[in-house]
Amino acid sequence: MAPWGPSLSSQAYVGLAGNFGAVKVGRQFSPLYQAYGSIDPFVNGFAANINNFFGTDANNSSNYERMSNAVIYETPDNLYGLKASVAYGFGGVAGDTSAQSQVGASLGYLNGPLTVSYAYHQANNEQAGETGSAYDTFKTNFIGAAYDFGPVKAHLAFDQNQQGDTFKTQDYLVGITVPMGAHAIFADYTHKDNKLVANADADQYAVGYTYSLSKRTNLYGAYTYVKNQQNSLIDTDVAGNSVGTVQVGVRHSF
């Protein structure tokens, strides 16, 4: 069982699946978000969530975990370890089919201990205002890899985000997973390099622990510390603030 992660109930879609793969229509996780989960030691969960840093726009927010009004095609699982998906999300703006639309794609390889994943996401007229004003198109490219050595699993990830012709950030992640029977420890370090705004880099340090009571139930604890530079706003409304988060609880999967 994964240490934590998104609930399937946060999606709402219908689809068809068969030897051809799967086609799904509705509100669902983007290919980018799925790629994150295949690499992130915390599996897109908790305060250590990779989305705190990766795929963030000029407002330091990540709005690409789910796609509404989306059509997604996924290849079948028997392609010698290869897995791909493509997605298109209709924007829903009357008279303009491309406004606020989204496009995504991913390609992954899982064979034995090795996982490699690439994803691309584009949001047109990202976060358009109520009066019709719009920001520049947002684009992100993500690549990551994980290798299970047995006693330790290593995780590496990188992305580059661009908004219009000016906004650009890069993010780096290195992490480990240490399984010990019913116990498991997860840890990672994440860095944001802001190439547009001076003194706006940030670092995140995270460690988590789970104990499996059964196949469906586990105890968990996590601590995350985000250190912002003077002009950085990761996980805070006050520029330069550092933020520490502690989480404990019980998780049961139905």
Image (cartoon, grey):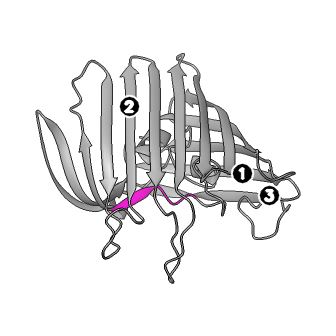
Q: CA distance from mark 2 to mark 1?
A: 30 Å
On the picture, is 192 further left or further right than 160? right
Amino acid at circle 1: Thr
**Which numbered tag is attached to residue 232?**
3
**Which numbered tag is attached to residue 107?**
2
Q: CA distance from mark 3 to mark 2?
A: 32 Å
Residue 254 visible, this orientation = no
Q: Position of residue 161 (x, y in %)?
A: 60, 46
Tell which circle, 3 or 1, labels the residue nearer the N-terminal end: 1
Q: Are marks 3 and 2 in contact (CB under 8 Å)?
A: no
Q: Which residue occupies 61% across, 34% down? A: 158
**Which-is-in-front pick, marks 3 and 1?**
3
Tell which circle, 2 or 1, labels the residue nearer the N-terminal end: 2
Amino acid at circle 3: Ser
Check disc 1 and report the residue beneath it: 224
Q: Quadrant of the N terminus?
A: top left
Q: Is residue 168 magenta?
A: no
